[in-house]
Image: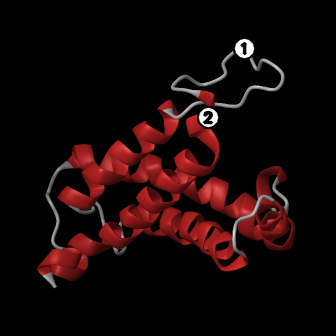
Amino acid sequence: MDLLLGTSPSWGITVVRITLGVIFFAHGAQKVLGWFGGYGLKGTTAYFASTGLPLAVAYAVCFFEFLGGIGLMLGLLTRPAALAVIVVMIGAIAKVHWQHGFFLNWELAPGKGHGLEANLAFIAMALACLVAGGGALSVDNILAR
């Protein structure tokens, strides 16, 4: 149980975890609920399927982001939530961002997408959560006692 819920008492990892959780909750809520200008589950999975992604993977991406974001915000099952984020970001790099190079498309040049730098930052944040756990202010920390 320690491997799952055990956590560092660090407040630093708490900040990283909550920030990453908010980011992935927001993106997941776009995909699953249609909040924040998103297309909802039906629209998002249809789009992903149109790009050649298997429908089961499309659903997994949506729920990994949404539930992973909630888990990270609360510090509940932090390690599995962080792993879900890592899996989604590796997939996003392979499927979308790799072809656009390293940098974000800050100038929003037409026909050019974002590179993989943000994905790498998210992976690094998630890896920190995977290693350290949820931190001082987490449900995992309460449950581990």
Please tell me which residue is depicted at 66% across the width and 22% down the height of the picture: 105
The answer to whether residue 11 is seen in the rendering is yes
Q: Secondary structure at mark 2?
A: helix
Type of the residue with mark 2: Gln
Residue 34, image x and y in percent? 81, 63
Q: Is residue 90 shown left or right of residue 23?
A: left
Image disc number at residue 99: 2
The residue lying toward the viewer, choosing from 35 and 40, is 40
Quadrant of image for the C terminus: bottom left
Q: Dot 1 corresponds to which residue?
A: 107
The residue lying at 62 percent from left, 29 percent from top is 100
Q: Is 42 located above or below residue 93 in the figure?
A: below
**Viewer-proximal residue, 96 or 60?**
96
Q: Quick one: label 2, few (<14), some, or many (20+) residues within 10 Å?
A: some
Whichever of labels 2 and 1 marks the residue nearer the N terminus, that label is: 2
**For the image shown, how many numbered marks are present on the structure?**
2
Residue at image position (72%, 14%) is 107
Determine whether 116 is above or below 10 in the image. above
Question: Seen in the image, is 2 located left or right of residue 52?
Answer: left
Q: Provide residue 43's location: percent of width, then percent of height.
A: 86, 66
Tell me the number on the disc at residue 54: none
Residue 136 visible in rendering: no
Image quadrant where residue 67 sits: bottom right
Quadrant where the N terminus sits is bottom left
Q: For residue 60, which quarter of the picture? A: bottom right
| Label 2 to label 1: alpha-carbon separation | 17 Å
* Identity of the residue drawn at 48% across and 31% down: 117
Amino acid type, label 1: Glu
Secondary element at image label 1: loop
The residue most toward the bottom is 1
